[in-house]
Amino acid sequence: MTLDLSLVTDYISHGTGLVVLNPATNRVITTVKEYDAASVESAVIDSERAFKQWSHLTAKGRAELLQKWYGLILENAEGLAQIITAECGKPLAEARGEVAYGASFIEWFAEEGKRMYGDVIPSPLAGKKIIVQKQPIGVISAITPWNFPIAMITRKVAPALAAGCTAVVKPAETTPLSALALEALALEAGIPKGVMKIIPTTDPVSVGKVLTEHPVIKKFSFTGSTPVGKLLMKQCAGTVKKVSLELGGNAPFIVFNDANIDKAVEGALISKYRNAGQTCVCANRFYVQADVYDEFISKFTKAVSGFTVGNGAEEGTIVGPLIDEAAVEKVEGLVSLAKEQGANVALGGARHNACGNFYSPTILTDIHHSNAIAQAEIFGPVAPVFKFDAEEEAVQMANDTPYGLAAYFYTQDLGRSFRIMQALEYGMVGVNEGIISTEVAPFGGVKESGVGREGSRYGLDEYTEIKYCLLGGL
Ligand code: ADP
């Protein structure tokens, strides 16, 4: 099957530029035009110009354009999914799911933008009125990762545009095509030029400096690793930008003795092996209570051993490649260290023999909590399974990390459900559920997993300023 690149024709570079590879084959897909720091500065100025007009449209006017964009994404869903699979590797079924998920933010925020309500607060003094209004913050910038090359952009850009902001977005070096296709469809929908600009680059450091330090930009939104997020947050301090950061996670997945084990296995499969384990909310550590440990391991191993590993473009593939060779080497290093520290390999434990960047779905058992793998964000198809006895012990181990993004647990006991929901130091908790993302709920982390929320009505607030006006002499 040849990949249809007609959506991104205008962005293809016929000389030098950013080379895009297929991680399943390591072959070149195409090369796209790229931006340097100077051309990003002019994109920021264009964005400022566009803001003056875009912010003056009515919310309904913006919503109509966003709805058209949403419609065009759905019309082009199959082409977009194929581009995602080609440049990021995830199986086509998952890529199709991502297109629908990514588009859902545009539909949601097109509506939500109409409800950017303020307040009228009763004044404590006579003859005065207190009016509070929400206004778009201005030009925003964003830097996004490769693991959800469409959804991580729409989750930021849709609320920004709905609120009346304009956006300059740097996609990951490995996945510029999905982002450029989104821009092409936004332009086709009639969203004016400059309202959303995608700026691929091979120089994230210099371009990142413009996006975090330029005084015209009032807000910066980032999804990526914690160390890079910390650095970019520091860079934003110089101009006191509002920031949203969606950073790394180390999600615990706890299975209690009273859980429905078949449901827990089902949740574990989807939570761990989605996108070959390369999402920040993927289950990273499994804690299983002693009485059901053997049953869980046996059912989990049986299910995972049936997974088809291969090129995501082939129907039936469950686990695709990792994003690049460095990602495979990182996973190899973590597994070999875990083994040295006593882990037993119940399944996999090595590279997969398909060419490209594949690692076999792996399950590690009999691990002590002190094993280094308990503290690492694995970002690969490896499930370390720990055994515990008491409820408090599971909570203590689950919280023993600087991260606090997503956590999951399985139990059929209502009292325990409430206790554990309360005790877990995480921004998101799935109870008897392995997948929690939806456009209507607030996605985000606590501790070193980030600040701010995306999606839901809270996601719109990230792109607004509150203005308080006191009307006197009434
Ligand atoms: P990942 O491990 O998911 O690739 P990164 O944090 O390295 O996470 O990358 C996420 C995004 O951050 C990508 O778009 C990448 O280009 C960008 N990035 C990485 N380092 C920097 C930096 N120093 N300045 C600006 N952007 C960066």
Image (cartoon, rainbow, N blue to C red):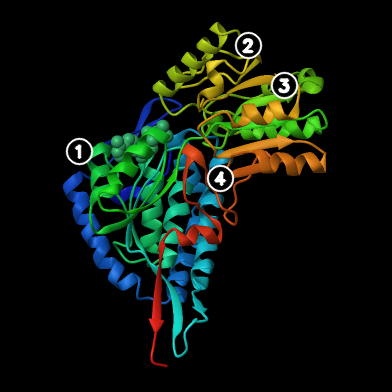
Closer to the observer: label 2 or label 3? 3
**In the image, 253: left or right of 68?**
right
Q: Check if mark 3's residue and mark 1's residue have beta carbons within 8 Å.
A: no
Amino acid type at image mark 3? Phe
Q: Earlier in the sequence, mark 2 or mark 3?
A: 2
Which residue is identified by label 1?
15
Q: CA distance from mark 2 to mark 1?
A: 47 Å
Q: Earlier in the sequence, mark 3 or mark 1?
A: 1
Q: Which mark is residue 388?
A: 3
Tell me the quadrant of ligand 1.
Answer: top left
Q: Nearer the viewer, residue 444 or 7?
A: 444
Cα–Cα span, label 3 and label 4: 38 Å
**Mark 4 = which residue?**
96
As helix, strand or loop, the secondary structure at mark 1 comes to loop
Whether residue 317 is visible: no
**Left or right: residue 167 compared with residue 42:** right
Q: Tag 2: residue type? A: Val
Q: Are marks 2 and 3 in contact (CB under 8 Å)?
A: no
Residue that mark 2 sits on: 345
Q: Toward the viewer: 89 or 244?
A: 244
Camera sees residue 208: yes
Q: Position of residue 52 (x, y in %)?
A: 28, 71
